[in-house]
Amino acid sequence: MSLESHITRVIWEEASRDWVELSSCDVVVVGAGPSGLTAAKYLAEKGLKTLVLERRLSFGGGIGGGGMLLHKAVVDERGLGILMDFNIRYKPSSIRGLYVVDTAELTAKLAAGALDAGAKIIPGISVEDVIVRYNPFRVQGVVVEWSAVQFSGLHVDPLFIESKAVIDATGHDAEVLRILEKKNPESKVKIPGEKSAYSEKADVDVVEYTGRVIPGLYATGMAVAAVHGLNRMGPIFTGMLLSGRKVAEAVIRDLES
Ligand code: 48F
């Protein structure tokens, strides 16, 4: 047998093993942006089987774009503990209380932290629907498709991943929550959408409102702003980090109770 056939065999075997293993998870995090990756680390560290699904082939979400494509992001004092947990280097800026990080380091180390803690990240997968149950209404997993199939517009039936908790970490569009609003009136989810910029307020509010939206479904990061009608904050990432950690704590609490 040739090396080529061995390569194919090994990739199919190992990918299939992962998919079989992950067809039932403790937590599915939808979106590998700053809030989703942060949540994944703290969840996986607690021993929960945590799967991060990311539509794109890269991770980091909005981090990579920095502020208007400049490769720096801002964090304030509240976020330093999390930066240290991930071993992310930061520098005090010329403005007291504000620190700067390189976007490449923030992206790479958030992902590395989640992976090292035991989370699995699968890129190129889009969540296009959720699994629901009634009486009481709850979310019990996600419906997934290759992003490439979605982009091509082919009609291909998706597959399912069961999970005890789903976290919407899809950012400004709050894509998972929007599925609830559109397809499941029983969920009573309404998405007013985020408001205009007010960084100081938004970066605190987004943490305050982070948590469970309906049974089985949680929101973190800018998805929280969309579902609660909060302001946007721009490229200050303290709120994203704290929101990621807070949603992990909420899920851990609920799954332990
Ligand atoms: O947008 P994103 O970075 O979300 P976040 O964690 O952070 C927001 C900040 O980056 C920034 C901000 C605050 O400073 O305003 O924008 O809230 O990352 C969301 C990720 O989710 C993926 C998307 O490709 C991105 O990487 N995503 C979105 N929809 C889906 C998805 C989906 N349906 N299935 C899988 N991945």
Image (spheres, grey):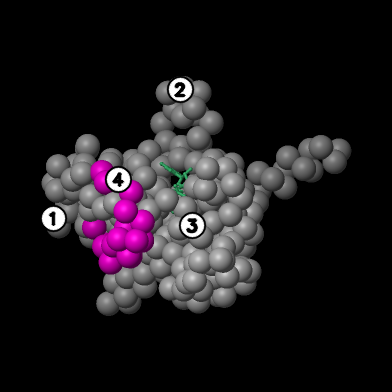
Q: Is mark 3 within 8 Å of ligand 1?
A: yes
Q: SS of the residue at dot 2? A: loop
- Contact, CB < 8 Å: mark 4 with mark 1? no
Residue visible at 30% across and 45% down in the picture: 196
Q: SS of the residue at dot 4? A: strand
Label 3 crowd (10 A; few <14 / some 14-19 / many >=20): many
Amino acid tagged 2: Gly
Amino acid tagged 3: Pro
Report the Cα–Cα distance between label 2 and label 3. 29 Å
Amino acid tagged 4: Ser
Instruction: Point out the tag, 2 or 3, that comes first from the N-terminus.
Output: 3
Residue visible at 22% across and 37% down in the picture: 182
Q: Which residue is mark 4?
A: 196
- Given this view, does label 2 or label 3 mark the residue nearer the observer? 3
Instruction: Point out the tag, 3 or 1, that comes first from the N-terminus.
Output: 3
Instruction: Point out the tag, 4 or 3, that comes first from the N-terminus.
Output: 3
Query: Where's residue 51, x and y in %?
Result: 48, 57
